[in-house]
Image: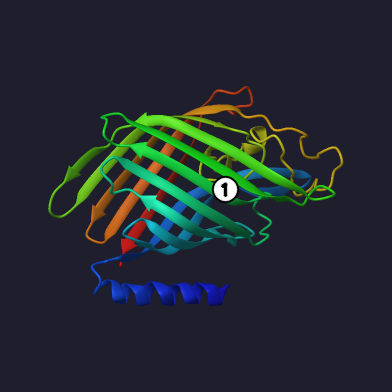
């Protein structure tokens, strides 16, 4: 892993040097993300979950057409098993500077380290597609995410998958001068999915930011009940509405630096809802 990370650093900085001579055909960047995730806390015979700070630094490079690659290790900041729990590699296209559409088409692969503070998930890959139409005052948004992997808890192992959709609309309010720019975008989204497994998919934040996720997912396997014959994979997966999301994204940009706080409130629609829940995250970014 050190060799992979070192090679990516060499690639980023070598391209950065060449980019200055090629009118920024490639843009290297680094980010630092702060958020919370549910971690396992074993007390006697009880398995409890508590929200814990998670920190994810990342480094990537993207060309003028939006194609890029990103590497991001994720850490638990505190607790008995603090440390890295996941590496994420991303390759794909992200376009946010076009006149009509914002567009994303990414493939993510998750490498898990086996950290005992994180719930098991069989979902190790994600394909995420999405677009926002920007020519209307109220901008329509449509996103879909497909996650897949191998569930090794059963015998024999089986293919696991989850599907998510999000549709809604939002509007961006902007303020800009020669020194800085500030954008804030409130959105209202309707989320739907299979909600089969705990996972780190981009559209299932109402699961992996929520310490009550065991009441949402249909196929939860605690670390103390792996292999339980009465806790096996559901024979079928049902796609259903999950929640109504009130989302707020913002970005403050000055020179090469950017600060991006965001958060959501989730109002459950399904009968398995856990009440009104939310998530937050904040990203600091720097373009080389």
Q: Quadrant of the C terminus?
A: bottom left
Q: Is 42 left, or right, of 179 in this rendering?
A: right
Point 42% across, 53% down: residue: 93
Point 28% across, 40% down: residue: 100
Farthest residue toward the left? 178
The correct choice, above or below, for 163 with respect to 282 in the image is above
Q: Quadrant of the N terminus?
A: bottom right
The correct choice, above or below, for 50 with respect to 15 in the image is above
Residue 256 position in % (x across, y down): 26, 61
Point 41% across, 60% down: residue: 68
> What colour scheme has been applied to the protein in the rendered image?
rainbow
Callout 1 crowding tier (Cα within 10 Å): few <14, some 14–19, many ≥20: many
Point 52% across, 28% down: residue: 243
Marker count (numbered):
1
The correct choice, above or below, for 3 with respect to 266 in the image is below
Camera-side residue: 209 or 232? 232
Q: Is 67 left, or right, of 210 in this rendering?
A: left
| Figure quadrant of residue 231 | top right
Residue 230 position in % (x across, y down): 85, 37
Q: Secondary structure at mark 1?
A: loop
Examine the rendering and report whether any part of residue 154 can be seen: yes
Examine the rendering and report whether any part of residue 188 can be seen: no
Residue at which label 1 appears: 200
Residue 166 position in % (x across, y down): 48, 33
Residue 156 position in % (x across, y down): 84, 50
Farthest residue toward the right? 229
């Amino acid at each position: 892993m050190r060799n992979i990370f070192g090679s990516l650093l060499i690639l980023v900085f070598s391209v950065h040097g060449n980019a200055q001579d090629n009118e920024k055909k490639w843009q290297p960047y680094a980010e630092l993300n702060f958020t919370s995730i549910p971690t396992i806390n074993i007390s006697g015979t009880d398995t409890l979950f508590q929200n814990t700070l998670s920190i994810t630094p990342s480094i990537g490079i993207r060309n003028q057409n939006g194609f890029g690659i990103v590497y991001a290790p994720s850490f638990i900041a505190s607790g008995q098993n603090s440390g890295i729990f996941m590496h994420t590699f991303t390759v794909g296209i992200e376009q946010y500077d076009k006149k009509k559409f914002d567009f994303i088409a990414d493939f993510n692969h998750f490498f898990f380290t086996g950290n005992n503070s994180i719930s098991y998930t069989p979902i190790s890959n994600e394909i995420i597609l999405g677009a926002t139409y920007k020519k209307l005052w109220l901008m329509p948004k449509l996103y879909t995410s497909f996650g897949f992997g191998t569930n090794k808890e059963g015998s024999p192992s089986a293919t696991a998958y989850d599907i998510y959709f999000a549709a809604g609309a939002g509007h961006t309010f902007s303020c800009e001068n020669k020194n800085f720019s500030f954008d804030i975008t409130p959105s209202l989204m309707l989320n739907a999915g299979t909600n089969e497994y705990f996972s780190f998919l981009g559209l299932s934040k109402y699961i992996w930011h929520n310490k009550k996720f065991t009441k949402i997912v249909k196929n939860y396997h605690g670390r103390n009940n792996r292999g339980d014959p009465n806790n096996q994979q559901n024979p079928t997966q049902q796609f259903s509405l999950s929640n109504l999301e009130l989302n707020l994204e913002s970005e403050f940009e000055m020179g090469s630096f950017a600060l991006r706080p965001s958060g959501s409130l989730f109002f459950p629609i399904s009968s398995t809802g856990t009440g009104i829940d939310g998530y937050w995250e904040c990203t600091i970014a720097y373009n080389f």
